[in-house]
Structure formats: C-alpha cells, structure tokens
Amino acid sequence: MRGAAALALGAVFALGQPPFDLWWAAILALVALFAVLRDTGAKAAGWSGWLFGTGYFAISLHWILQPFQVDAAATGWMAPFALVGLSAGLALFWAAGIWAGRRLAPGPFGIGICWAAAELARAYLFTGFPWGLVGYLWAPTPVAQWHAVTGPHGLSLATLLLAGFAAMAARFGWRAWAAFGGIAAMWLGGLWLTPAGQTPQDGPIVRLVQPNAPQHQKWDPDYIPLFFNRQIDFTAAMPRPDLIVWPETSVPNLLKNADYALDIISEMAGGVPVVLGIQRENDGNYYNSLIVLNAAGEVGETYDKHHLVPFGEYMPFPELFARFDILGLAARAASGYSAGPGPDLIDLGPLGRALPLICYEAVFPQDVGAAPERPDVLVQITNDAWFGTYAGPQQHLAQARLRAIEQGLPFIRVANTGISAVIDPAGRIVGSLGLGRAGYLDVTVPQPAAPTVYSRTGDWPVIIALFGALAALIAVKRRAPH
C-alpha cells in the first residue's frame, strides 16, 4: 500500500513541471511523501523513494519517447525500454538519498540533506542529467528568483527541508507549522529579489529565425530546400536587425561544403551578422557547431558543442552495444559527434560577448557558469523537434529561463520548431515564437543585470553546506547509543 502511494505521489509531483506547472500540487505531493516515509525503516524508505522517483520521471520525461519515433521502423521498439530504463535509473539517485537519510537520522532533516546531495550527484555524475530538479517546481512563481542566490541545488535543498518539516506538523504542532512560514518567506523573498521589468527602446535588435522543420522531414531531400528557403526569406525581411540567429543544424551541409549556402545567407542578410548551426568535419571527427557569419560574409567565430547527449550524439561503449546487435544505436555510434574543447565566448558586435550553448548544454547550470569570463548575453540554438510538440520543448524553455535568473543575463533562444524566445535577466519572456510555427521575430535585447551571487560562487556554497551537514549527521550517528 505504501509503495502504491509513493508511485502515485511521484506522478502527482511531476505535475509541477511544464506544461502543467501545478507547483502547489507538487508541493503537496512532496509533503505527502514525507508523511508516508514517517516511521519507516531505511530499506522501506529507500524503496518508497525509488517508486516515487520512478513515477515522477516516467510522467515528467515522457517526451523521451519522441526521438525514437522519428524513424519508428528502426528505433520505435526501443522507446518503452528507454522511458522505463531512464525513469527507473534516475530514481535510484532519489532512492539512495532517501535510504541514506533514514539511516543517518530519524526525522526529515537527514532525508532532506541526503536527497539534496543525491540531486547534486545527478547533475554531475555520468556526464550529468539535471533535468527536472526538485527545485524547478518553483519556476512559475517568484520563488524561482532564489536561483540568483542559491542556484538550483540550494533551492532544492530548501524545498526538501521545508516539505519534510511540514509533514511533521500533525505530530509536532507549531514548530513544524513554521515550515509553512518558511515557504511564505521564500515567496516574499522571491518577490523582493525580482528585478524591475525592462522596457528597452534603443538596444540591439535580434531576429529569431524559426523554420519549423519536423524531425522526420528535416533531412529529407524533398524538404531541405523548403526549410532553407524559409530561413532565407525570414533573413531578408526588412527592416534589418543588428543580429540574426538561425537554429541548431539549420544549414544542410557540412561547413567545408557550405560556401554556396553561406554566400546566399550573407547576401540576404545584407551585412547583418548571422549566428547559425551547422555540422563540421575535421580530421575525420564530426562536430555539432555554431558559427558566426560576419558582415563580410566570412566565418568569424566557431564554437563546437562540448557537452554531448549520451546515446543521442555519441554512443558510450559502442562496441558493447554492437556486440548485442543493437543496430539502431550502434549505427549512430559510427557517425557520432566529437566533443568540443569547452565553454567559450564569441563576439556578437553590438550585443557584446556571448556564451554560446547548443541544445542540451543549456540544462547544465555548472556549464553556463563555466565561461572564461562573464558574458553580456547567453545564446542557445537548439533543435527541439526531437522532443515533440508538447512537454519537452516547454521544459527546455523553462530551464533556459532559470539560467537567465542564475546569471542575471539576457538569454536569446532559437529553436527549429519552437519555442524561440528572448528572456530578460529575471527570467521573463520578452518575445517568443510558439511551437510548430514557422516565422521570425525581431526583439530588442534587454541589458544584463549586475552579477548574481550564484554567478560568482556557483555550486560551491551548497556543496560545502551539504558535506558539512552530512559530516555532522554521521558524527551524531556514531555517538548515539546502540
């Protein structure tokens, strides 16, 4: 009975993520889980935590089925295994955290600390996958502004501790009810932290170019000219902006074979720099790249994606999968991408220095904070056609908003099928192009805000706090009479 309740609560907890954004339901589910965990042993708590996590990830990550349907005949059979395997695998982090927390302390404090540590580990280990972190449930609310101070892991820690103590309300009276006061304080603090809205009048203007090329048609020779010409038409539209941005892999040639296409783009841009996504090859290695086509029509800047998607852009242990005759995955391994050298800045003229991000890289707070110096703007090009037209692109956009808050920087996001947007340093969407729509949009780019606390410290304060708390729990546990 307890296990079924944990699984169902995990599914409700997933409703805190886009497109539902039912943050209040997610909070109630989290509080209810802590109530379920009350008076359980470590083994039962860990099992309940795994079921809760499995229910959560299965619902919130259901868009992972979409990439396997692009070529359903070859890879469709993998879809349910991918969803079940990913959900159950990610849930192991939560199970381990909850099990360890119950082992170390009887109340909610141990579980909250160890669960937050498990979320931190999920963001870093095995290349990391910080999608749908606990604290992201606050994204539609003013509480999200705490990302500028604590970062995502600090907010996850606070959320878990407050939910845990709220679950103790029936047993400990007013002392635990203070947890609800803590949530109110987080809300009021978020309102206080929210910068005033900007209404820039004479700043640089960026053009977002969204061709809306569905993934099953994107590389079809019959459709390639259609999508390319759409982008050309949008690029040539008057009046001219200060910068034009095309999405990820928007040019259908390798860079070394793209001179003709780049000449057309440059001519239609009329001297305006163009940021675009393209694939390039060097010494037999292939890269998912971003280039800046400058006013003279030359490739002025090149950035190669460095944080690649496992199983999507490269195959871990390809020989192992080939041995088991998993042809769909092994075939991709043979032509997978190589990783670029790491975060770097590019010059965008009137917009200043930008940190380029390609698709998946925008979900990693630590990568965005790893720029060699503070940029003036964040620029993400992506192809969210892989994620379908429902939850995946909306969750990806929500995480871009949080990166803007964390760094106090404007964020330019251009997606093949949407959602393309310009986001201000408070995470507000200044202008956007919706899902499944072909078009372009000219938007004035907001000015950067002052550097945030999180942009200066990164995850180190939370890491130190978690290690200190874990050390204290272990010390108390060892001194306790057996």
Image: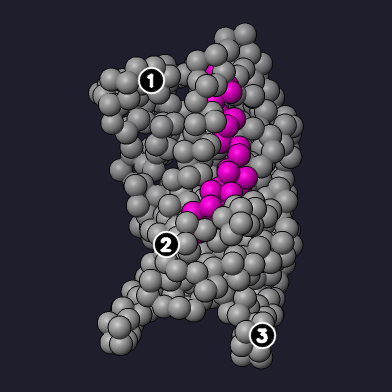
Q: Which of 389 and 366 is in front in this view?
A: 389
- Where is residue 115? Give x, y as percent: 45, 65
Name the quadrant containing residue 302.
top left
Give the number of marks. Answer: 3
Residue 469, relative to residue 435: is it above or below? Answer: below
Tell me the kind of residue under disc 3. Trp
Position of the C terminus, as image quadrant, is bottom left
Residue under numbered circle 2: 43
Residue at (39% x, 17% y) in the render: 327
Q: Is mark 1 on a helix, strand or loop?
A: loop
Residue at 51% over, 44% down: 87
Identify the residue shown where x is 47% and y is 18%. Answer: 253
309 to 8, vertically: above or below: above
**Amino acid, disc 2:** Lys
Element at badge 3? Answer: helix
Q: Which residue is drawn at 53% across and 52% down?
A: 51
Asked whether the beta carbons under mark 3 and mark 1 sit within 8 Å of each other, the answer is: no
Residue, disc 1? 326
Q: Position of residue 241 (x, y in %)?
A: 66, 42
What secondary structure predominates along the stretch shown in magenta?
helix
> Is 153 colored magenta in this rendering?
no
The amino acid marked with disc number 1 is Ile
Q: Mark 3 points at which residue?
A: 177
For label 1, the crowd category at 10 Å Cα-Cα, with few meaning under 14, some 14 to 19 and many 20 or more, is: some
Give the extent of the magenta segment.
49-71
